[in-house]
């Protein structure tokens, strides 16, 4: 199967290394979501694919999040079509959920910025190795909320108070900061990322990977997030009725700070 936004390498010991390759920013476009969906269908059925690694070919970004340029166009295209933005978020959630539920282990190899949806994608993996850039759920700085599982998976991973701090302040953490709070598995030197991830993936692959898949399923059964994902997708759409994304996304694209607080000073 061929993919326009992914490059797939089949390595020794059943390791499949998939690099996201979606220039210019490695943002999450519809084409990337479709490719990931098809890739998961291919690899789920292929039992020789024992460990999946997700990395990136972009020089600076792991994944820059949802495609904000596409989102601006879609917001006007979808205006008045109740549920269309929610459905787009649900589609991204569905594909990231397939990564989370992939029946063998999945490792994220993060060499650069993993922001917004990029962080959500990394959170859907079982393990995160990081060598550079920043990681965080940055959506609130744009007037949005995480819409691809981030509100659920970050809260489960770090607890409610830490997740609230990181999400409300749209924190971008270095690899050292992310490792200190357990957001990533391990911070590594930039020139050692591939080597370290490969050694880790090989160690996994030599073990009982099908048992790991079944253990994953059982762990997740204790923490069903379907209800939370539904609210997340609905509220992602509701952000557009607050007017905040209009300011937040415009400010980002115009490379200026967002001004959400209107001037309320009483005129003399
Ligand atoms: N969607 C669409 N385009 C994006 C993008 C995104 N998520 N992130 C970056 N880009 C574009 C920028 O608009 C810019 O385009 P331009 O050259 O037409 O101006 C280009 O990619 C380079 O971005 P720039 O910010 O100049 O590069 P940088 O190396 O200084 O910073 C990032 C890279 C990823 C740290 C920064 O672009 C960023 O913070 N992006 C937004 C991340 C985010 O909050 N994502 C969540 C979305 S919900």
Image: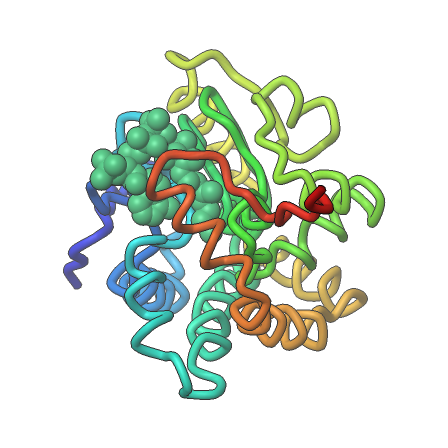
Please state the horizontal and vertical placement of residue 254, each as a whole percent of the image.
34, 40
The answer to whether one can see residue 11 in this image is: no
Residue 182 place in picture, x, y as percent: 72, 32
Which residue lies at the image location 39% right of the left edge and 49% below the top edge? 250
Question: Position of 217 compared to 208: left or right?
Answer: right
Dividing the picture into quadrants, the one containing residue 235 is bottom right
How many tags in the picture? Answer: 0
- Image location (x, y in percent) of residue 171: 63, 34
Name above or below for residue 228 compared with residue 111.
Answer: below
x 46%, y 79%: residue:
87
Q: Is residue 228 left or right of residue 233?
A: right
Q: Residue 68 location in percent, x, y? A: 36, 53
Q: Name the residue located 35 percent from the left edge and 67 percent from the top edge.
A: 37
Question: Which residue occupies the foreground of this view, 157 or 203?
Answer: 157
Along the viewing direction, whichever of 164 and 261 lies nearer the viewer: 261
Residue at image position (76%, 40%) is 165
Quadrant hosting ligand 1 = top left
Residue 8 as seen in the image, left or right of residue 198:
left
| Position above or below: 193 against 149 | above
């Amino acid at each position: 199967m061929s993919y326009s936004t992914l490059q797939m390498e089949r390595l020794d010991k059943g390791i499949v290394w998939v690099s996201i390759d979606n220039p210019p920013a490695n943002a999450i476009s519809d084409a990337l979501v479709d490719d990931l969906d098809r890739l998961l269908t291919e690899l789920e059925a292929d039992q020789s694919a024992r460990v999946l690694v997700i990395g990136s070919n972009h020089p600076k970004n792991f994944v820059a999040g949802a495609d904000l340029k596409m989102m601006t166009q879609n917001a006007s295209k979808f205006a008045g079509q109740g549920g269309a933005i929610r459905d787009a978020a649900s589609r991204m959630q569905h594909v990231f959920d397939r990564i989370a539920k992939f029946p063998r282990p999945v490792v994220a190899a993060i060499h650069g910025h993993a922001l917004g949806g990029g962080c959500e994608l990394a959170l859907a993996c079982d393990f995160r190795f990081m060598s550079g850039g920043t990681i965080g759920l940055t959506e609130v700085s744009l007037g949005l909320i995480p819409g691809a599982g981030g509100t659920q998976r970050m809260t489960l991973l770090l607890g409610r108070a830490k997740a609230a701090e990181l999400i409300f302040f749209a924190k971008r953490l270095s690899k050292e900061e992310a490792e200190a709070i357990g957001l990533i598995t391990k911070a590594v030197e930039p020139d050692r990322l591939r080597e370290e991830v490969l050694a880790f993936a090989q160690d996994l692959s030599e073990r009982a990977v099908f048992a790991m898949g079944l253990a994953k399923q059982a762990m997740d059964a204790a923490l069903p997030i379907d209800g939370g994902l539904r609210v997340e997708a609905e509220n992602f759409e509701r952000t557009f009725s607050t007017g905040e994304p209009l300011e937040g996304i415009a400010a980002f694209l115009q490379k200026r700070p967002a001004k959400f607080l209107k001037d309320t000073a009483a005129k003399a």
